[in-house]
Amino acid sequence: MATLATNKKALFNYELVDKFEAGLILDGWEVKSIRAGNISLKESYVIIKNNRAYLQGAHVGKWQGAVIPIGGETRDRELLLHKDELAKLFSAMKIKGQAIVPLNIHMAKHRIKAEIALARGKKLYDKRSVLKEKDQKSDIARDLKRMGM
């Protein structure tokens, strides 16, 4: 499974509750561009409308020579999920403080898939504790390196 793009902020801002793998409905130029790594999930999210899931805000860079309609680089892309997965996501969205966030875009058996997660927002003190732990680990690693261990 080759990862093509990751959403690093999702792991920092959210506590993951449940993960799902979904297919993407893409145009031909989008497939070529994503395989080349021209995709950003930085401010993307998943919405559910009309019993379908859509990836919004994901930016797919323009492929050379492709004729792209206006707004085509950040258009809504439909996600392919099973009915029971959609029902679970839809019922969980009604709970306050939960969101559906894309974690990464990857290749699975020559197909482009999106890993999405049902997530709960972290509080500010949770984020601070994560940063504090990260700083402590780097300090320990630096000290061990100085001591020659």
Image (cartoon, helix red, strand yellow):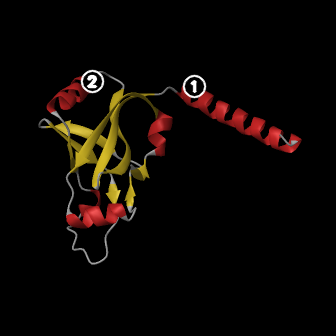
Q: Position of residue 94 (x, y in %)?
A: 25, 23
Q: Position of residue 61 (x, y in %)?
A: 35, 65
Q: Is residue 97 above or below residue 114?
A: above
Determine the secondary structure under disc 2. helix
* Picture mark count: 2
Check residue 125 in the rendering and tell me which mark sits there, or answer none: 1
**Quadrant hosting residue 31:** bottom left
**Quadrant hosting residue 140:** top right
Q: Residue at left 24%, top 39%?
A: 47
Disc 1 from disc 2: Cα separation: 24 Å
Nearest to the observer: residue 127 or residue 104: 104
Determine the secondary structure under disc 1. helix
Q: Residue at left 27%, top 63%?
A: 30
Dot 2 amino acid type: Ala
Give the quadrant of the C terminus.
Answer: top right
Q: Residue at left 34%, top 41%?
A: 115
Direction bottom: furthest residue: 65
The residue indicated by pointer 2 is 92
Q: Position of residue 128 (x, y in %)?
A: 60, 30
Nearest to the observer: residue 40 or residue 149: 149
Nearest to the observer: residue 101 or residue 4: 4
Q: Is residue 47 left or right of residue 125?
A: left
Direction right: furthest residue: 147
The first of marks 1 and 2 along the sequence is 2
Question: Tag 1: Cα neighbours inside 10 Å, few (<14), some, or many (≥20)?
Answer: few
